[in-house]
Image (cartoon, rainbow, N blue to C red):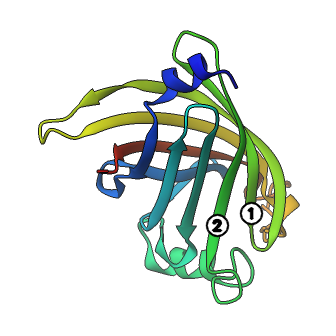
Amino acid sequence: MSTTETLTIAPVGTWTLDPVHSRVGFEVAYQAGTFKGEFTETAAELSVDGEHVSLEGTAKVTSVDVKDENQSAHLQSPEFFDAERYPELRFTATDIRLDGEGKVAVDGEITIKGVTKPVQMTGAVNAPMVDSFGKERIGLELESAVDRTDFGLNWNMPLPSGGQALGNDVKIVAELQFVKAEA
């Protein structure tokens, strides 16, 4: 990545996730609609040194929230994420590209349930700005889709009319706000 593109993403420095104003979630087809959830305990860091940009993030499996504690518990069980054996999900970027109009493509690796697969996330980066507390802040909105069965999340339930209750393709949504760390 060239220096010009790097500076467009964010000024040089380390940027830490503002978890209060960020969201990492998922959406999957379920019966007649869409099943949505999010991870409430996330961490991420964006580092820009002028020649290199890195982005890494994690989400604690025990923080999965789907607005029903029984379903949250099921998602933490070995039938899904297996929180006891695999307590976190991880994403590491391997390349970040801009198109010059605020659109971004991030190639990386995602690890779910101990399985690591390549993934490309696309979206937008919001220009750096100074917030109401005098801190530099940027926004990054990313989406991708993965097949949950590639990661060993195979649980499903047959429907009386045929087919399965739960789709395999899962949309991952990350709405991230980063604050520049003070020097």
> Which of the 4 image quadrants contains residue 52?
top right
Label 2 residue SS: strand
> Which of the 4 image quadrants contains residue 176?
top left
Question: Which label belongs to residue 89?
Answer: 2
Label 1: few (<14), some or many (≥20) within 10 Å? Answer: some
Contact? badges 1 and 2 (CB < 8 Å): yes
Q: Residue at x 69, y 81 (%)?
A: 86
* Relative height, residue 73 to residue 109 (above, below): below
* Relative height, residue 117 to residue 123 (above, below): below
Q: Residue at x 34, y 52 (%)?
A: 18
* Amino acid type, label 2: Leu
* Of the image marks 1 and 2, the number of the one nearer the N terminus: 2
Label 1 residue SS: strand
> Which of the 4 image quadrants contains residue 104?
top right
Q: Is residue 27 left or right of residue 10?
A: right
In the rendered image, residue 10, in percent from the top left (x then y), is placed at 45, 30
* Relative depth, front residue between 36 and 22: 22
In the rendered image, residue 133, in percent from the top left (x then y), is placed at 12, 42
Disc 1 target residue? 111
- Quarter of the image with the N terminus is top right
Spatial CA span between label 1 and label 2: 6 Å
Q: Residue at x 69, y 75 (%)?
A: 81
* Amino acid type, label 1: Thr
* Relative height, residue 131 to residue 65 (above, below): above
- Taking the view exactly as shown, the residue that stands out farthest to the top is 101
In the rendered image, residue 24, in percent from the top left (x then y), is placed at 50, 52
Label 2: few (<14), some or many (≥20) within 10 Å? Answer: many
